[in-house]
Each structure stands twice: as structure tokens, then as C-alpha cells.
Image (cartoon, rainbow, N blue to C red):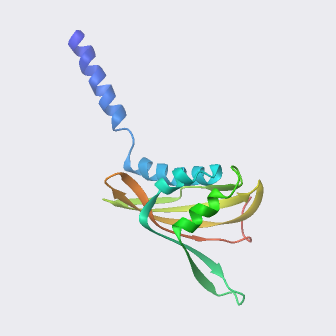
């Protein structure tokens, strides 16, 4: 009986240690990004990004044509750090997640609230890479619009 309990304990512990899937790990990094934004926590925010991270937004110019705007991760992090906690609240839904070895793609429609008021909606497209220390966001591009948003 003693050996049975030891074996059972080892099996339960090893199952718990492997319970987090690769999908869970990817979602955790993205969730951490938005938690850091909401809490204006630049230290946590930095941990989400790869060193060579690319950040882009698709907007419209005055004529209505799509324009891709590049932003430096450091500039984004600094802008979040200047906000009071709770000001930037991006609420996402995980819609698509695919993994192939060290590469993951994630699609998350979102609604963005600033200081408690609805601002805009859109979709985020993430590409993450699994490095030695874990998953990091390598590429993020998003859309932003004020029309066609479901509140």
C-alpha cells in the first residue's frame, strides 16, 4: 500500500506539471500583455516581447486607403507607462491559435476601452516564437475602427 501511494503521488505530480499545454503557454503570454497594459506595468510588458519585436497598426488615411504604421516596442512600452493603472483596457477573445514547433500565430478580435469608455475595436494578429526562456511576441499587427463594433 505504501508503494502504491508513493507511485500515485508521483503520477499526480507529473501530470500536474505537464498540464499546461503549448496553447495555454501562448495564451498566457498574450493575456499577460493585456494585463500589463491595464495595470500600466512596463516591467511585465517588456517580458512579453522578443528583443527584435515588430509592432504595426493598419489605419486609414484621409482618402480611406489602408496605411501600415510602424511603432517601436520601446515607444509603446513608454506610452503605457505614462498611463494611470486601469486606463487602457483591451478586452480580447481568442479566436484562432496555431502552433508549429517554435512558431505560433494567434488571432484575437478585441474591444478597447480608455478610462472606462469604449474607444474602438479591431483584431490583433500575433506571431510568437518559443525561445529558450519561453514564448515571446515577435510580431503584432492590428486593425482599429470605430464602426461595426459590437458592444
| x then y, percent, for residue 138 | 43, 65
For the C terminus, give its image quadrant. Answer: bottom right
User: Outermost residue, bottom direction?
Assistant: 63
Residue drawn at (71%, 90%) of the image: 63
Label count reads 0
Q: Quadrant of the N terminus?
A: top left
Closest to the observer: 124 or 136?
136
State left or right for residue 53 relative to residue 11. right
Residue 70, how many percent across, how many down?
Answer: 55, 77
Residue furthest out toward the right? 117
Along the viewing direction, whichever of 83 and 123 lies nearer the viewer: 83
Q: Quadrant of residue 119?
A: bottom right
Task: Identify the residue at image location x=31%, y=53%.
Answer: 132
Q: Residue at x 41, y 60 (%)?
A: 98
Closer to the camera in the image, 121 or 138: 138
> Is 31 placed above or below 12 here?
below
Amino acid at each position: 500500500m505504501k508503494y502504491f501511494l508513493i507511485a500515485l503521488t508521483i503520477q499526480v505530480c507529473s501530470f500536474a506539471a505537464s498540464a499546461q499545454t503549448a496553447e495555454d503557454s501562448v495564451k498566457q503570454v498574450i493575456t499577460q500583455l493585456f494585463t500589463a497594459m491595464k495595470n500600466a506595468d512596463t516591467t511585465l510588458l517588456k517580458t512579453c516581447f522578443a528583443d527584435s519585436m515588430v509592432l504595426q497598426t493598419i489605419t486609414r488615411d484621409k482618402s480611406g486607403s489602408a496605411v501600415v504604421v510602424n511603432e517601436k516596442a520601446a515607444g509603446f512600452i513608454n506610452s503605457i507607462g505614462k498611463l494611470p493603472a486601469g486606463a487602457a483596457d483591451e478586452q480580447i477573445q481568442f479566436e484562432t491559435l496555431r502552433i508549429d514547433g517554435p512558431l505560433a500565430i494567434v488571432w484575437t478580435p478585441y474591444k478597447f476601452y480608455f478610462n472606462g469608455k469604449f474607444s474602438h475595436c479591431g483584431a490583433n494578429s500575433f506571431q510568437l516564437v518559443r525561445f529558450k526562456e519561453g514564448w515571446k511576441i515577435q510580431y503584432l499587427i492590428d486593425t482599429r475602427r470605430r464602426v461595426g463594433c459590437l458592444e
